[in-house]
Image: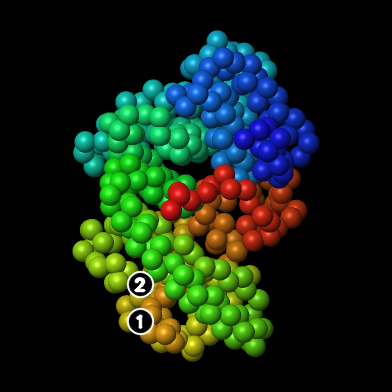
Amino acid sequence: MTVSELLRIADHLDPSDQALVRKAFERAATAHNGQHRLSGEDYVNHPLEVAAILADLELDAETISAALLHDTVEDTNLTAEEVKREFGPEVARLVDGVTKLGRISLRTDQQQQAENIRKMMVAMAEDLRVVLIKLADRLHNMRTLEPLTEAKRRKISRETLDIYAPLAHRLGIGQIKWELEDLSLRNLEPEAYDDVVKRIARKRNERETLVSDLREILARELEKVGIQAEITGRPKHIYSVWQKMTRESKDFSEIYDLSAIRVQVESVRDCYGVLGVVHSLWKPMPGRFKDYIAMPKSNGYQSLHTTVITHTGEPIEIQIRTQEMHRVAEFGVAAHWTYSSGRTRWGTPSRSSTRSRSTSSRTRSTSLRPAAT
Protein backbone atom coordinates (compact mmCIF):
# COMPACT_ATOMS: atom_id res chain seq x y z
CA MET A 1 0.00 0.00 0.00
CA THR A 2 1.28 3.48 -0.92
CA VAL A 3 -0.17 6.88 -0.15
CA SER A 4 -1.07 7.25 -3.84
CA GLU A 5 -3.08 4.02 -3.67
CA LEU A 6 -4.75 5.24 -0.49
CA LEU A 7 -5.78 8.47 -2.18
CA ARG A 8 -7.22 6.55 -5.12
CA ILE A 9 -9.41 4.64 -2.67
CA ALA A 10 -10.35 7.93 -1.00
CA ASP A 11 -11.57 9.44 -4.27
CA HIS A 12 -14.69 10.75 -2.47
CA LEU A 13 -12.51 13.42 -0.84
CA ASP A 14 -11.96 16.80 -2.45
CA PRO A 15 -8.40 18.02 -3.19
CA SER A 16 -7.97 19.96 0.06
CA ASP A 17 -9.02 16.94 2.12
CA GLN A 18 -6.72 14.68 0.13
CA ALA A 19 -3.92 17.13 0.90
CA LEU A 20 -4.66 16.70 4.63
CA VAL A 21 -4.45 12.91 4.27
CA ARG A 22 -1.16 13.14 2.39
CA LYS A 23 0.23 15.47 5.08
CA ALA A 24 -0.82 12.99 7.78
CA PHE A 25 0.92 10.15 5.96
CA GLU A 26 4.14 12.16 5.59
CA ARG A 27 4.07 13.00 9.31
CA ALA A 28 3.39 9.39 10.25
CA ALA A 29 6.17 8.15 7.98
CA THR A 30 8.62 10.55 9.63
CA ALA A 31 7.47 9.65 13.14
CA HIS A 32 7.65 5.88 12.52
CA ASN A 33 10.91 6.08 10.57
CA GLY A 34 13.15 3.16 11.55
CA GLN A 35 10.34 1.19 13.18
CA HIS A 36 9.42 -2.21 11.80
CA ARG A 37 6.73 -4.80 12.44
CA LEU A 38 7.64 -8.38 13.37
CA SER A 39 7.27 -9.30 9.69
CA GLY A 40 10.13 -6.94 8.91
CA GLU A 41 8.06 -4.45 6.92
CA ASP A 42 8.17 -0.73 7.67
CA TYR A 43 5.76 0.07 10.49
CA VAL A 44 4.08 2.86 8.53
CA ASN A 45 2.53 0.22 6.26
CA HIS A 46 0.20 -0.69 9.13
CA PRO A 47 -1.45 2.75 9.55
CA LEU A 48 -1.61 3.00 5.76
CA GLU A 49 -3.64 -0.22 5.58
CA VAL A 50 -5.87 0.88 8.46
CA ALA A 51 -6.52 4.17 6.68
CA ALA A 52 -7.35 2.29 3.47
CA ILE A 53 -10.02 0.23 5.26
CA LEU A 54 -11.65 3.43 6.47
CA ALA A 55 -11.30 5.15 3.10
CA ASP A 56 -13.15 2.22 1.56
CA LEU A 57 -16.01 3.02 3.95
CA GLU A 58 -15.91 6.56 2.52
CA LEU A 59 -15.11 8.16 5.85
CA ASP A 60 -13.99 11.77 6.10
CA ALA A 61 -10.49 13.18 5.83
CA GLU A 62 -10.15 13.70 9.58
CA THR A 63 -10.86 10.03 10.30
CA ILE A 64 -8.48 8.79 7.62
CA SER A 65 -5.79 11.20 8.81
CA ALA A 66 -6.28 10.10 12.42
CA ALA A 67 -5.94 6.46 11.28
CA LEU A 68 -2.58 7.30 9.74
CA LEU A 69 -1.48 8.93 12.99
CA HIS A 70 -3.19 6.56 15.43
CA ASP A 71 -0.02 4.96 16.82
CA THR A 72 2.24 8.00 16.77
CA VAL A 73 1.47 9.46 20.20
CA GLU A 74 1.77 6.04 21.86
CA ASP A 75 4.79 4.68 19.97
CA THR A 76 6.84 7.64 18.71
CA ASN A 77 8.16 10.99 19.90
CA LEU A 78 5.23 12.86 18.36
CA THR A 79 3.12 14.46 21.10
CA ALA A 80 -0.62 15.02 21.31
CA GLU A 81 0.05 18.77 21.36
CA GLU A 82 1.99 18.55 18.11
CA VAL A 83 -0.80 16.55 16.47
CA LYS A 84 -3.32 19.20 17.53
CA ARG A 85 -1.11 22.05 16.31
CA GLU A 86 -0.36 20.44 12.95
CA PHE A 87 -3.70 18.78 12.17
CA GLY A 88 -6.30 20.55 14.28
CA PRO A 89 -8.35 19.62 17.36
CA GLU A 90 -10.63 17.12 15.59
CA VAL A 91 -7.83 14.86 14.35
CA ALA A 92 -6.06 15.20 17.70
CA ARG A 93 -9.22 14.17 19.57
CA LEU A 94 -9.64 11.08 17.40
CA VAL A 95 -6.00 10.05 17.88
CA ASP A 96 -6.33 10.56 21.64
CA GLY A 97 -9.52 8.48 21.70
CA VAL A 98 -7.84 5.57 19.90
CA THR A 99 -4.87 5.79 22.27
CA LYS A 100 -7.19 5.57 25.31
CA LEU A 101 -9.08 2.60 23.86
CA GLY A 102 -5.78 0.83 23.31
CA ARG A 103 -5.06 1.01 27.02
CA ILE A 104 -8.19 -0.96 28.03
CA SER A 105 -7.29 -4.30 29.58
CA LEU A 106 -9.22 -6.88 27.58
CA ARG A 107 -10.15 -10.16 29.21
CA THR A 108 -12.50 -12.58 27.54
CA ASP A 109 -12.90 -15.40 30.05
CA GLN A 110 -16.59 -14.67 30.53
CA GLN A 111 -19.21 -13.67 27.98
CA GLN A 112 -20.69 -11.06 30.33
CA GLN A 113 -17.30 -9.49 30.81
CA ALA A 114 -16.86 -9.25 27.05
CA GLU A 115 -20.26 -7.57 26.82
CA ASN A 116 -19.26 -5.04 29.46
CA ILE A 117 -16.02 -4.31 27.63
CA ARG A 118 -17.90 -3.64 24.39
CA LYS A 119 -20.18 -1.20 26.21
CA MET A 120 -17.17 0.49 27.80
CA MET A 121 -15.44 0.90 24.46
CA VAL A 122 -18.48 2.61 22.98
CA ALA A 123 -19.05 4.72 26.08
CA MET A 124 -15.42 5.86 26.23
CA ALA A 125 -15.49 6.97 22.62
CA GLU A 126 -16.99 10.44 22.47
CA ASP A 127 -16.95 10.01 18.72
CA LEU A 128 -17.93 6.71 17.07
CA ARG A 129 -15.21 7.27 14.51
CA VAL A 130 -12.73 6.38 17.27
CA VAL A 131 -14.31 2.92 17.49
CA LEU A 132 -14.23 2.57 13.71
CA ILE A 133 -10.50 3.33 13.65
CA LYS A 134 -9.98 0.74 16.38
CA LEU A 135 -11.97 -1.85 14.42
CA ALA A 136 -9.94 -1.16 11.28
CA ASP A 137 -6.75 -1.39 13.34
CA ARG A 138 -7.82 -4.79 14.67
CA LEU A 139 -8.81 -6.01 11.20
CA HIS A 140 -5.40 -5.28 9.74
CA ASN A 141 -3.70 -6.83 12.76
CA MET A 142 -5.78 -9.97 12.23
CA ARG A 143 -4.70 -10.10 8.59
CA THR A 144 -1.05 -10.03 9.63
CA LEU A 145 -0.82 -12.44 12.59
CA GLU A 146 1.53 -14.92 10.92
CA PRO A 147 4.80 -13.72 12.56
CA LEU A 148 3.36 -14.19 16.08
CA THR A 149 3.55 -17.33 18.17
CA GLU A 150 0.58 -19.70 18.15
CA ALA A 151 -0.32 -18.76 21.72
CA LYS A 152 -0.35 -15.07 20.86
CA ARG A 153 -2.36 -15.65 17.69
CA ARG A 154 -4.95 -17.63 19.65
CA LYS A 155 -5.21 -14.98 22.36
CA ILE A 156 -5.71 -12.17 19.88
CA SER A 157 -8.19 -14.22 17.85
CA ARG A 158 -10.27 -15.10 20.93
CA GLU A 159 -10.31 -11.44 21.91
CA THR A 160 -11.38 -10.54 18.38
CA LEU A 161 -14.18 -13.10 18.28
CA ASP A 162 -15.51 -12.17 21.73
CA ILE A 163 -15.21 -8.40 21.51
CA TYR A 164 -14.41 -6.86 18.15
CA ALA A 165 -16.57 -8.97 15.81
CA PRO A 166 -19.69 -8.48 18.00
CA LEU A 167 -18.90 -4.77 18.18
CA ALA A 168 -18.74 -4.60 14.38
CA HIS A 169 -22.07 -6.46 14.27
CA ARG A 170 -23.63 -4.02 16.74
CA LEU A 171 -22.54 -1.14 14.52
CA GLY A 172 -23.93 -2.97 11.48
CA ILE A 173 -20.61 -3.19 9.61
CA GLY A 174 -21.01 -6.56 7.94
CA GLN A 175 -17.85 -6.34 5.86
CA ILE A 176 -15.61 -6.05 8.93
CA LYS A 177 -17.60 -8.46 11.10
CA TRP A 178 -17.45 -11.34 8.60
CA GLU A 179 -13.75 -11.03 7.98
CA LEU A 180 -12.91 -10.77 11.66
CA GLU A 181 -14.91 -13.94 12.33
CA ASP A 182 -13.31 -15.92 9.51
CA LEU A 183 -9.79 -14.86 10.47
CA SER A 184 -10.44 -15.68 14.13
CA LEU A 185 -11.72 -19.15 13.29
CA ARG A 186 -8.67 -19.83 11.12
CA ASN A 187 -6.42 -19.29 14.16
CA LEU A 188 -8.63 -20.80 16.87
CA GLU A 189 -9.84 -23.90 15.01
CA PRO A 190 -7.47 -24.38 12.06
CA GLU A 191 -8.56 -27.95 11.32
CA ALA A 192 -12.25 -27.04 11.38
CA TYR A 193 -11.53 -23.97 9.25
CA ASP A 194 -9.68 -26.03 6.63
CA ASP A 195 -12.44 -28.67 6.66
CA VAL A 196 -15.16 -26.10 5.92
CA VAL A 197 -13.02 -24.48 3.21
CA LYS A 198 -12.53 -27.87 1.52
CA ARG A 199 -16.23 -28.73 1.75
CA ILE A 200 -17.18 -25.40 0.20
CA ALA A 201 -14.54 -25.80 -2.52
CA ARG A 202 -15.83 -29.24 -3.50
CA LYS A 203 -19.24 -27.76 -4.26
CA ARG A 204 -17.96 -24.52 -5.76
CA ASN A 205 -18.24 -25.37 -9.47
CA GLU A 206 -21.66 -26.94 -9.04
CA ARG A 207 -22.82 -23.97 -6.96
CA GLU A 208 -21.48 -21.35 -9.36
CA THR A 209 -23.20 -23.03 -12.29
CA LEU A 210 -26.50 -23.09 -10.41
CA VAL A 211 -26.21 -19.45 -9.34
CA SER A 212 -25.38 -18.40 -12.90
CA ASP A 213 -28.44 -20.24 -14.27
CA LEU A 214 -30.75 -18.77 -11.65
CA ARG A 215 -29.43 -15.24 -12.22
CA GLU A 216 -30.17 -15.57 -15.94
CA ILE A 217 -33.70 -16.88 -15.33
CA LEU A 218 -34.52 -14.25 -12.73
CA ALA A 219 -33.09 -11.38 -14.80
CA ARG A 220 -35.20 -12.41 -17.78
CA GLU A 221 -38.40 -12.54 -15.71
CA LEU A 222 -37.71 -9.23 -13.97
CA GLU A 223 -37.15 -7.57 -17.32
CA LYS A 224 -40.62 -8.74 -18.40
CA VAL A 225 -42.26 -6.91 -15.49
CA GLY A 226 -40.07 -3.81 -15.83
CA ILE A 227 -37.95 -4.15 -12.68
CA GLN A 228 -34.33 -3.10 -13.04
CA ALA A 229 -32.08 -5.08 -10.72
CA GLU A 230 -28.46 -5.97 -10.06
CA ILE A 231 -28.24 -9.72 -9.39
CA THR A 232 -25.10 -11.22 -7.89
CA GLY A 233 -23.97 -14.37 -6.11
CA ARG A 234 -23.25 -14.04 -2.41
CA PRO A 235 -20.39 -16.05 -0.89
CA LYS A 236 -21.08 -17.88 2.36
CA HIS A 237 -18.69 -16.95 5.13
CA ILE A 238 -16.69 -19.77 6.64
CA TYR A 239 -17.42 -18.91 10.26
CA SER A 240 -21.16 -18.84 9.58
CA VAL A 241 -21.05 -22.33 8.04
CA TRP A 242 -18.98 -23.65 10.96
CA GLN A 243 -21.39 -22.13 13.48
CA LYS A 244 -24.37 -23.88 11.92
CA MET A 245 -22.52 -27.20 11.82
CA THR A 246 -21.46 -27.00 15.48
CA ARG A 247 -23.97 -24.92 17.45
CA GLU A 248 -27.02 -26.05 15.48
CA SER A 249 -25.68 -29.58 14.89
CA LYS A 250 -26.41 -29.36 11.19
CA ASP A 251 -24.83 -31.51 8.54
CA PHE A 252 -23.06 -29.61 5.79
CA SER A 253 -25.79 -30.72 3.34
CA GLU A 254 -28.44 -29.08 5.57
CA ILE A 255 -27.02 -25.58 5.25
CA TYR A 256 -29.48 -24.13 2.75
CA ASP A 257 -27.88 -20.74 2.33
CA LEU A 258 -24.49 -22.10 1.29
CA SER A 259 -25.51 -20.88 -2.15
CA ALA A 260 -27.20 -17.50 -2.27
CA ILE A 261 -28.29 -14.80 -4.67
CA ARG A 262 -28.51 -11.13 -3.80
CA VAL A 263 -30.83 -8.82 -5.72
CA GLN A 264 -30.46 -5.03 -5.47
CA VAL A 265 -33.20 -2.72 -6.72
CA GLU A 266 -34.09 0.96 -6.58
CA SER A 267 -37.12 0.99 -4.28
CA VAL A 268 -38.88 -0.88 -1.47
CA ARG A 269 -41.80 -1.45 -3.84
CA ASP A 270 -39.45 -3.22 -6.25
CA CYS A 271 -38.17 -5.42 -3.38
CA TYR A 272 -41.61 -6.89 -2.89
CA GLY A 273 -42.10 -7.06 -6.65
CA VAL A 274 -38.96 -9.17 -6.97
CA LEU A 275 -40.17 -11.39 -4.12
CA GLY A 276 -43.39 -12.08 -6.02
CA VAL A 277 -41.47 -13.02 -9.15
CA VAL A 278 -39.10 -15.28 -7.19
CA HIS A 279 -41.98 -17.15 -5.56
CA SER A 280 -43.73 -17.54 -8.89
CA LEU A 281 -40.60 -19.15 -10.35
CA TRP A 282 -39.56 -21.43 -7.50
CA LYS A 283 -41.37 -22.97 -4.53
CA PRO A 284 -40.55 -21.22 -1.23
CA MET A 285 -39.50 -23.35 1.70
CA PRO A 286 -41.86 -23.07 4.70
CA GLY A 287 -40.46 -21.12 7.62
CA ARG A 288 -37.56 -19.72 5.59
CA PHE A 289 -38.98 -16.26 4.74
CA LYS A 290 -37.81 -13.25 6.74
CA ASP A 291 -39.03 -9.69 6.21
CA TYR A 292 -36.29 -7.50 7.67
CA ILE A 293 -37.61 -4.51 5.72
CA ALA A 294 -40.85 -4.31 7.67
CA MET A 295 -39.02 -5.37 10.85
CA PRO A 296 -35.34 -4.32 10.64
CA LYS A 297 -32.70 -5.92 12.83
CA SER A 298 -31.50 -3.96 15.86
CA ASN A 299 -28.38 -2.77 14.00
CA GLY A 300 -30.45 -1.30 11.16
CA TYR A 301 -30.09 -4.20 8.72
CA GLN A 302 -32.93 -4.42 6.18
CA SER A 303 -33.54 -7.04 3.49
CA LEU A 304 -35.99 -9.71 2.39
CA HIS A 305 -34.70 -13.27 2.82
CA THR A 306 -36.37 -16.28 1.24
CA THR A 307 -35.17 -19.82 0.56
CA VAL A 308 -36.63 -21.57 -2.49
CA ILE A 309 -36.35 -25.00 -4.08
CA THR A 310 -34.85 -24.55 -7.53
CA HIS A 311 -35.57 -26.51 -10.70
CA THR A 312 -32.62 -28.77 -9.80
CA GLY A 313 -34.18 -29.64 -6.46
CA GLU A 314 -31.48 -27.77 -4.53
CA PRO A 315 -32.47 -25.07 -2.03
CA ILE A 316 -30.99 -21.59 -2.41
CA GLU A 317 -31.36 -18.43 -0.39
CA ILE A 318 -32.30 -15.19 -2.14
CA GLN A 319 -31.78 -11.80 -0.50
CA ILE A 320 -33.61 -8.77 -1.87
CA ARG A 321 -32.82 -5.18 -0.87
CA THR A 322 -32.47 -1.64 -2.18
CA GLN A 323 -29.06 -0.24 -2.98
CA GLU A 324 -29.19 1.97 0.11
CA MET A 325 -30.10 -1.03 2.28
CA HIS A 326 -27.06 -2.79 0.86
CA ARG A 327 -24.81 0.13 1.83
CA VAL A 328 -26.17 -0.02 5.37
CA ALA A 329 -25.69 -3.80 5.49
CA GLU A 330 -22.06 -3.51 4.39
CA PHE A 331 -20.99 -0.25 6.05
CA GLY A 332 -23.34 0.09 9.05
CA VAL A 333 -23.14 3.37 10.94
CA ALA A 334 -20.74 4.77 8.34
CA ALA A 335 -23.53 4.63 5.75
CA HIS A 336 -25.71 6.97 7.85
CA TRP A 337 -23.28 9.85 8.16
CA THR A 338 -24.32 11.70 5.05
CA TYR A 339 -27.64 13.48 5.34
CA SER A 340 -29.78 14.04 2.27
CA SER A 341 -29.23 17.74 2.90
CA GLY A 342 -25.60 17.29 1.92
CA ARG A 343 -24.13 17.67 5.41
CA THR A 344 -22.49 14.95 7.40
CA ARG A 345 -23.24 14.02 10.98
CA TRP A 346 -20.03 15.76 11.94
CA GLY A 347 -21.16 19.12 10.58
CA THR A 348 -18.93 19.41 7.51
CA PRO A 349 -20.15 19.53 3.92
CA SER A 350 -20.41 16.19 2.16
CA ARG A 351 -18.62 16.12 -1.19
CA SER A 352 -20.26 12.87 -2.22
CA SER A 353 -23.85 13.89 -1.49
CA THR A 354 -24.33 15.09 -5.06
CA ARG A 355 -23.55 11.71 -6.58
CA SER A 356 -24.78 8.17 -6.06
CA ARG A 357 -22.97 6.39 -3.27
CA SER A 358 -24.29 2.89 -3.85
CA THR A 359 -21.54 0.31 -4.00
CA SER A 360 -22.86 -0.89 -7.33
CA SER A 361 -22.11 2.45 -8.96
CA ARG A 362 -18.35 2.17 -8.61
CA THR A 363 -15.61 -0.40 -8.38
CA ARG A 364 -14.61 -0.65 -4.77
CA SER A 365 -11.08 -1.28 -3.60
CA THR A 366 -10.08 -4.60 -2.12
CA SER A 367 -9.19 -3.18 1.30
CA LEU A 368 -12.24 -4.94 2.74
CA ARG A 369 -11.43 -8.26 1.22
CA PRO A 370 -12.72 -11.58 2.51
CA ALA A 371 -10.46 -14.01 4.29
CA ALA A 372 -8.56 -16.33 2.00
CA THR A 373 -10.37 -19.53 1.13
State the separation of the CA atoms marked 1 and 2: 10 Å
- Name the one closer to the observer, 148 or 350: 148
Query: Given the image, on which type of amino acid does mark 2 rest?
Result: Tyr
Q: Earlier in the sequence, mark 1 or mark 2?
A: 2
Q: Which mark is residue 294?
A: none
Q: Which mark is residue 256?
A: 2
Give the image location of residue 129, x and y in percent.
53, 37
The colour scheme is: rainbow
Query: Given the image, on which type of amino acid does mark 1 rest?
Result: Met
Quadrant where the N terminus is found in the figure: top right
Query: Residue 252 lies in what quarter of the image?
Result: bottom left
Q: Residue at x 45, y 49 (%)?
A: 371
Give the image location of residue 21, x and y in percent.
68, 30
Up the image or down, 332 lies above or below 360; here it is: above
Up the image or down, 251 lies above or below 124; here it is: below
Residue located farthest toward the top when viewing the structure as drawn? 77
Q: Is residue 225 left or right of residue 163?
A: right
Q: Residue at x 44, y 24 (%)?
A: 38
Q: Is residue 313 left or right of residue 27?
A: left
Res 236 seen here: yes
Up the image or down, 208 lies above or below 11; here it is: below
- Name the one closer to the observer, 328 or 308: 308
- Do tag 1 and tag 2 residues touch (Cβ < 8 Å)? yes
For mark 1, give the secondary structure. Answer: loop
Residue on which disc 1 sits = 285
Q: Nearer the viewer, mark 1 or mark 2?
A: 2
